[in-house]
Structures are given as C-alpha cells and as structure tokens.
Image (spheres, rainbow, N blue to C red):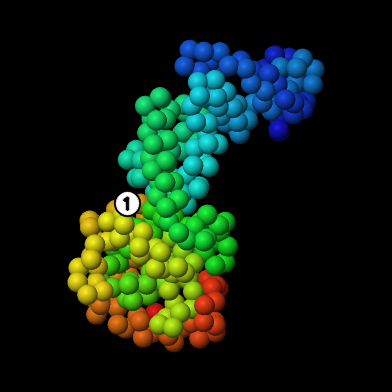
Amino acid sequence: MNKSMCLHCNNSNFETKNVRFSPEIKGETVDVVAPAFVCTQCQTPLMDSTQMSILRRLAADEYRTRHQLLTSEHIIKFRSALGMSQSAFAHYLKVGEASIKRWETYFVQDVVQDDHIRLKCDEAYAQLNALEVRWKNSLPDTFSGNKRFSLELFKQAVRYLVTSTNSALFLNKALFYADFEHFKRYGTSITGTRYIHLEYGPCPDQYQNLLKHLLNERILIPAGHHTFKASKNAELSFFSDSEKEVLAYIRQLTHDGGKKLLKLSHEEAAYKQTEPLEFISYAFAKELKI
Ligand SMILES: [Zn+2]
C-alpha cells in the first residue's frame, strides 16, 4: 500500500494482518476474520477495496451459513455444475444478471430466492442425471471446446437449429459447426458437447442417448419419418452475444436443410484426420471450411 497515512496516528507504515471484524448483516452481528492493512504503530486497520470486498463476502457467508442459506461459493458451484455463465444462469432463474453477481459475492438472498435457486438447480440436476452420456460431468478440455457441457444450452441450441435441419443427420452437423465455429472465433465451444467421428460425419458422442433424452423431455417431438420439430422456440437469452451470432450464422447456412454442411463436414480436417469412433479435438476448428 502506497503513501497512505494512518487515520489515527499519521504513521505511514502498514503490514497485512488477519483482523477480527464484527459487521452487521440484516440487523445481526457476525464475527469474521479478514485480511487488512494494519498500522505498525497503533494497530488501526485500513482497508483497500479488494479487502473490503473480501470482508463483505465473508460476512455475508457467515450470515448465510448461520441461516442455512446457500453461500456465495455454493451458488457459484451450482451454476458451474450446469455449465452456465452468470448471464445464462440469470435467464434460467428468470432474475437479473446483477442479482447473480451480487449473490455470488456479498448480497444475501432472501429465503424465497434461496428456495428458488435450489429448486431450479435440482430440476436441472435431475435432468442431467437422467441423461445417459458418459462425459456429461467431465471437466472442460480440448474435446469439449474448453467448456463444461451444459444440457440447458444444448437443448436451446437444438431447438434453434432443428427448425431448419429437421432430422438428426443434419442437426448433428449443424451442432458440430456451431460449436466448432464458436471455438474458432472465441476459443470456447457453445454447448461443451464432445464430438466423435462417425460413418456419416462428425457427430455428438452418444447422440442416440442425447436424442432419446430430448424426445423424452419433449424438447423435440416427432414430425414424420426420421424428422423432428422443437416443441417450443429456443430461449436465445441463455446465450451470449457471440454465441447468438454464431448460431444465427450456422442456421443461415442450413437453409437447404443442411445438405451443404453435411457434404462439407466430410471434407473437414476434423473428420479426415480422425479415425472412426475417435473423439474430435477442437484444435481442428482453425481449419474449418465454412
Ligand atoms: Zn496508526
């Protein structure tokens, strides 16, 4: 800390120490220990904004723990496990993004909000649990496009892209291109899906199980021989601006039903340089031909 003076004794030497504080949260006093600069002469603490943030978060979490509310860390873990950004999570919970940012730090959610977060996350976990896909809980890596798989985002991407592709064959290629194109432009996939080299092109691994799940959950409904339609429109608000931009770009490339992308997908390095049944690294994205 530079050139600050102690407010008590005008000394300008400080050292960082853990200090006990007793701030008041919602009318209750909580005890926390937080790092602060302390005057070497009279021990008066002086805090910078980072230390203040830590103190506020610790105090809020102490209160939350006392009242059996989710702590900031719980909320971050709940959201991360669903593969959602703060913005996607906000739309999923139907609250403002600012609320998520505050709940993940210093602002104590009320009991109704706490119940709502638990309920919505339980629903999402139950769905994820029912999904029979090996890698659904894997950590992000080069085969997931540096992103954790999000069933919610996958569902919305399917709803969006199936309107022009109509069948698993073409839909699978559109998903591949959307995830890989976003990786090429921004360094992450959109859905965190892992793709595999199959006879008829790059395809989400275990897509039969994904498809079965989408049909069971009535995200997709059969519309004829091997064709599907979405039961309702995609919630595009779950996606970031860059994700929406890439999804729109890919959907516009499938106005022929996806035939062009299907053909092109067999020409991709992602396909030609991988073996049947092998996972496809997103590193191939930089050579995409679209
Ligand atoms: Zn002092």
Which residue is labeled 1 in the image? Answer: 237
Which residue reaches farthest right?
A: 41
Q: Quadrant of residue 123?
A: top left
With 109 as the anchor, is 169 left or right in this view?
left
Rendered location of residue 244, percent (x, y): 34, 60
Picture residue at 60% right of the left edge, 31% below the top? 54
For label 1, being within 8 Å of ligand 1 is answered no
Q: Residue flagged by tag 1: what amino acid is it?
A: Ser
With 209 as the anchor, is 45 left or right in this view?
right
Rendered location of residue 25, percent (x, y): 51, 18
| Quarter of the image that includes the N terminus | top right
Which residue reaches farthest left?
A: 224
- In this view of the protein, which residue sits in the foreground, 213 or 163? 213
Q: Residues within 10 Å of mark 1 (few under 14, many from 20)?
A: some
Rendered location of residue 50, percent (x, y): 61, 34
Picture residue at 35% right of the left edge, 81% below the top? 262
